[in-house]
Amino acid sequence: MAGTAATARLGVWRTYDESIFLSEPGPGYDGDVLKVMSWNVAGWRRRSLPAGEAIGYQQRDISGTFAEALEFIRQEQPHILLTQEDTSGNRGSHFFNAVALLHEEFGHAYYGKLFNYSYFGGLLEGGNYGNAIYSRFPLYDPQMFSFADEISVSPFGNPFTERPELTSLDYPLTFLQDFFVGSKGVVSAGFSWKGRQVFFDNLHLGAGHVDPEREFQFELYINNVFNPTRMRLIGGDFNSPPNSKHHRLYDDGDDHTSDRSIQQAVLRMEELGLEKFVFWPVLGLHDRSFTHGEEYNTFPATDTETLAPRAPERAYDLIFGYAPRRNLEMISYRAMQDVHLSDHAPVIAEFALCNR
């Protein structure tokens, strides 16, 4: 059923945690191969969001980049598209509604407004960014989970959260962002494939020098969204290189020298049963790290200042599966490094059901 739901509260500075569900009941997918694309689209602007455009005193026409991206999506024809940093309209891009256009293209959509620039109780409407799931077949049981709701903005911590020791003094810029406009998070929705229930989980973890926060966010996802009794296809922007050889300081200022969030995520998977998770074998998961080659890197795909194409140096973006009955296999996996319409390259994976 289509609709809009406010899933949390009205803040002093912003309204947030609102989601849009656009799907009507109908038959599920009965094909043998399911094609999934995950893409951090960077607001359809070829680069990370500048502060001026976030606030709205600077504006950019994103319609051309979106048109090129839509042509690429049509060429690939995924059954499911997971986007991060998507938008149903914001002041910095003339309120261009990409969510509505992709809903029209796919037929079914679920969009979570994780970042909502609606200040002072909606008196100043700035627009939004968030995660979306687009599907060519009906979705059900939508859920959005915002990490901001679990992390204290108090410098003294919050004893009612899972990690009370994480405070605004540890990561002040992150916590100010959380307080004023929102945070990264997860959107999830169910789907019927050959009569089986499958859930799509679209994750976006924290960016920058906040790896303990990313570790905490993945734990929040496991504890609040992940249901180990259901088959799941998981994709998104993890903002940390899974290959430990890529743990270093980069020329764009990102320092991953001490990152361990991916290793801790794999440790959590081991506790759930690592044999139930489905990764592309060539990614080379070994000793809680990955050994993949450069062809699977996804970031940065463009230069932040010039928007010129770049060769990606680390694999922030991943797709993998989970099947409690071990009846799922991944039959292909690609990082589309020749696509330079965002600072992230899209990732495409194909899955098939198997009998076990």
Image (spheres, rainbow, N blue to C red):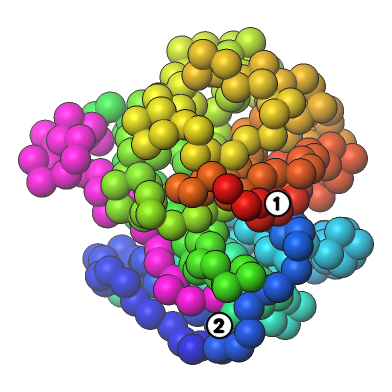
Position in image of residue 115 (x %, y %): 46, 59
Q: Name, please, the residue furthest toward the front.
A: 356
Residue at the disc numbered 1: 351
Give the secondary structure at mark 2: strand
Q: Residue at x 62, y 35 (%)?
A: 279
Quick one: 216 or 209, which is closer to the camera? 216
Q: CA distance from mark 2 to mark 1?
A: 25 Å
Residue type of the residue flagged with mark 2:
Leu
Q: Can you say whether 210 is above or below 291 in the image?
A: below
Q: Quadrant of residue 28?
A: bottom right
Residue 236 percent coordinates (x, y): 58, 46
Residue 301 lies left or right of residue 5; in this view the side is: right
Residue plotted at (62% across, 68% down): 193
Q: In terms of secondary structure, what is the magenta stretch mainly?
A: loop
Q: Above or below — where is 31 with respect to 1?
A: above
Query: Regarding mark 1 in the picture, which secondary structure is present there?
Result: strand
**In front here: 37 or 228?**
228
Which contiguous range is marked in magenta?
Answer: 139-168
Which residue is labeled 2 in the image?
22
Q: Image check: 60 left or right of 228?
A: right
Task: Give the residue type that dot 1 points to.
Answer: Phe
Judge whether residue 151 is colored magenta.
yes
